[in-house]
Amino acid sequence: MWQYEKKLQYPVNIKNPNPKLARAIIDQLGGPDGELSAALRYLNQRFSMPYAEVKGLLTDIGTEESAH
């Protein structure tokens, strides 16, 4: 059994919003060259790979990218 507590590990106190920084972070995470796109590319290429060793490597890289 586990207990869910909705709280952050480190408290975040935003005093002044910074739209420039927010745009840079969003582009890095969700843009065409972001983490999610990279993870999905690796995992998608895995399904067309004929070699088991390389298929495993692409799976490992894709799951590592999705963990970021």
Image (cartoon, rainbow, N blue to C red):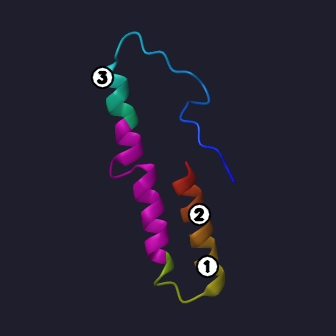
Task: Work out whether 51 lies above or below 10.
Answer: below
Task: Decide if residue 12 is on the left or right side of residue 57.
Answer: left
Q: Which amino acid does label 3 sit on?
A: Pro
Distance CA(mark 1)–CA(mark 3): 41 Å
Number of marks in picture: 3
State the quadrant of the N terminus: bottom right
Observer-nearest of 49 and 39: 39
Residue at numbered disc 3 = 19
Distance CA(mark 2)–CA(mark 3): 31 Å
Q: Earlier in the sequence, mark 1 or mark 2?
A: 1
Secondary structure under the numbered disc 2 in the rendered image? helix
Q: Residue 7, image x and y in percent? A: 55, 31
Give me the disc on residue 54. Answer: 1
Give me the disc on residue 61. Answer: 2
Q: Earlier in the sequence, mark 2 or mark 3?
A: 3
Q: Residue 36, image x and y in percent? A: 43, 54
